[in-house]
Image: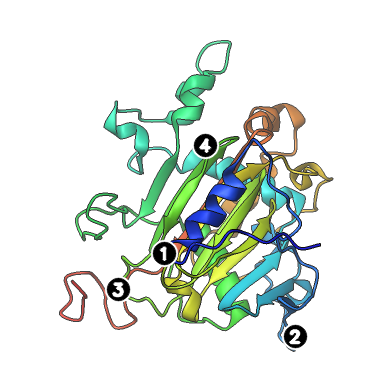
Amino acid sequence: MKRNFPQDEEDSFMTIFKYYKSNKPQPSLEQVLQSECNDEVSMMPNQNTSEDARASNLGLQNTKTWKMFEFKRHPGLILIRDPFTSSGQKYWIRNCLEEYPRKPNKTNIDIERHIEDWWQECLEGNQCDKKLQKKLRWTTLGYHHNWDTKVYNEENKNAFPSELSELCDVVANRLGYRDFRSEAAIVNYYHMGSTLSAHIDYSECDLEAPLFSFSFGQSAIFLVGGHNKSIKPSAILLNSGDILVMSKETRLCYHAVPKILPASKQPWNEGSTSIIEKGVNFKFVDETELILGMKKNIEDKEWSKFNSYVEESRININVRQVLKQNQKSLLDSNSNT
């Protein structure tokens, strides 16, 4: 039996958000969409595309085997269900904890104090500083998101991580977005009880380009609605290793995360994948360096401190293109204001 949600013409989105956020009583997950094909979800046809040879050394399964789903209420919303290998999930989790919060990248902790290397400081001494670990809520890469003005600035940016550019290029090519450029990212760190309120991502100059969202660690309920909050949102379950793509009409729709859920399994710990140098031509990274990074997590002792974090937290990387195709910087005459 389907649950009938109370209707609020002014803010149906908030009504659903509060329902799933609730702890007493706990929400039913009966209407949360997963990857079963039904009246609301359909599998995208497996187009005759060639395999991307870069995929395996970026921690991805063969691109020809990806299971991709569309949502009939939300044109342009695509879910790629678990295209990562176990080794790949470990690699990206580790980067999000060890590499991306380092300076010169920016974090929410900067408001309180300057920390050059957050992860290293969390692990100084014989015990992990859990309090400092849980203080990190976000870090920004490339063009840094301005949380007050919502406007990017040419002087407020750093080099975008090359390996993340490579990852997004593989995903973008698989979906036909061959001109996509990774120029800005927000890495969000969620703990049990964390939420993300309803919002629209509209700061980029090129709103035709898709937004790529990667999930690792614990699961989440993701809400996506319409162009105003009176439209009732759909609830979608996101698990570790999933990629959500917001494009076309959905690119400017309200979305939110009302609840983090314990993961039913730990795909990042399910075996290991053979990682060998293939002599593949990568666009942004050196293959040898990439493989060295992937192999760091082979030893359980080396991986254990990252595993302890992700066992009780969720990490989300969302990547977007800031500039239009004919722009080289925000100072170009074609820039939006």
Label 4 – label 2 distance at C-alpha: 38 Å
Label 3 – label 4 distance at C-alpha: 30 Å
Per the image, the residue denoted by label 4 is 98
**As shown in the figure, which amino acid type bears the numbered disc 1?**
Glu
* Eye-nearest disc, 3 or 4: 3
Label 2 – label 3 distance at C-alpha: 31 Å
Using the image, tell me which numbered label, if any, was put on residue 205: 3
Q: Answer whether labels 2 and 3 touch (C-beta < 8 Å).
A: no
Q: Quadrant of the N terminus?
A: bottom right
Going 35% across and 28% down the picture, which residue do you hit?
115
Residue 288 visible to an observer of this rendering: no
| Disc 2, SS | loop
Residue 289 position (above or below residue 11): above
Q: Answer whether labels 3 and 4 touch (C-beta < 8 Å).
A: no
- The disc, 2 or 3, on the residue closer to the chain's N-terminal end is 2
Report the front residue among 299 and 311.
311
Using the image, tell me which numbered label, if any, was put on residue 45: 2
**Residue 161 rendering spot, x and y as whole percentages:** 45, 54
Residue at the extreme right: 271
Per the image, the residue denoted by label 1 is 10
| Disc 4, SS | helix
Label 1 – label 4 distance at C-alpha: 43 Å
